[in-house]
Each structure stands twice: as C-alpha cells, then as structure tokens.
Image: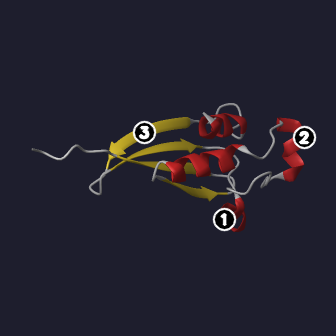
Amino acid sequence: MNILDNAVKFTPSGGKISISAVQDDSGFVVVKVTDTGIGIQKSEIPRLGERFYRADKTRSRELGGTGLGLSIVKHLMKAHNGSIDIESQVGKGTTVSLSFPINRVPKA
C-alpha cells in the first residue's frame, strides 16, 4: 500500500498508474507499480530506503507523510527474502519493482 500511495501522491491529475505481476525464471514474483508522476532524481534513489528521508522536501509539507513508507517496505521485503528496486526519471515517472520469493514445496 505504501508503494501505491506514493504513486498516487506524486502523479498529477491526468497521469497514469499501472500495476503488473509476473513470475520470473529465478523463482520470484515481481510486482511492478509504474506511474507517470514527477519522478525522482537518480542521485536520490539510493537514499529512499532511509528512515525519514524525503527526496522532495519542498513538496513534503504539501503532500504530508513521515518519510517512513519506503523504509518500511524495504525492511519488510528483506525480512521475507525479497527485494525492492526503484527506477525513475524526473518528469517522466517511476517504476518500483517488488520481488517476492516463491516458496515451493519439494516434490516427493
């Protein structure tokens, strides 16, 4: 929900948000949330999982939030042996990929 909330929050009216899920060949289900929002500067992306960090401080008062959402997601994904990847271009939008491991039961 934190990822989808960010997509809605940072995508202006008339923009688009899409959600997809695919199973890859390495045993993961990858859920992608893509938006046509404001985007994030490449230099900011590595810090997005830090607690209380906000990439766009000028908009933080306007849009609210604590700066904890992506940190929570990062830690939950790690706790479940998954991962989060963020790709973005300023003015074009952002794609957040969440990779969830598939637990397979060995065949008897």
Q: Which residue is mark 1?
A: 46
First in residue order: circle 2 vs circle 1 = 1
What residue is rendered at 77% in x and 55% in y?
Answer: 55
> Badge 3, how many Cα within 10 Å: few under 14, some, many 20+?
few
Residues at discs 1 and 3 in contact (Cβ within 8 Å): no
First in residue order: circle 1 vs circle 3 = 3
Q: Answer above or below: position of 97 versus 6.
A: below
What residue is rendered at 60% in x and 46% in y?
Answer: 73
Q: Which residue is mark 3?
A: 20
The image quarter containing residue 34 is top right
Distance, label 2 to label 1, CA atoms, is 22 Å
Foreground of the two, 24 or 52 = 52
- Quadrant position of the C terminus in the picture: top left
Q: Is residue 49 left or right of residue 20?
A: right
Q: Is residue 23 left or right of residue 106?
A: right
Report the amino acid beneath label 3: Ser
Tag in front: 2 or 1: 1
- In the rendered view, how is the structure colored? secondary structure
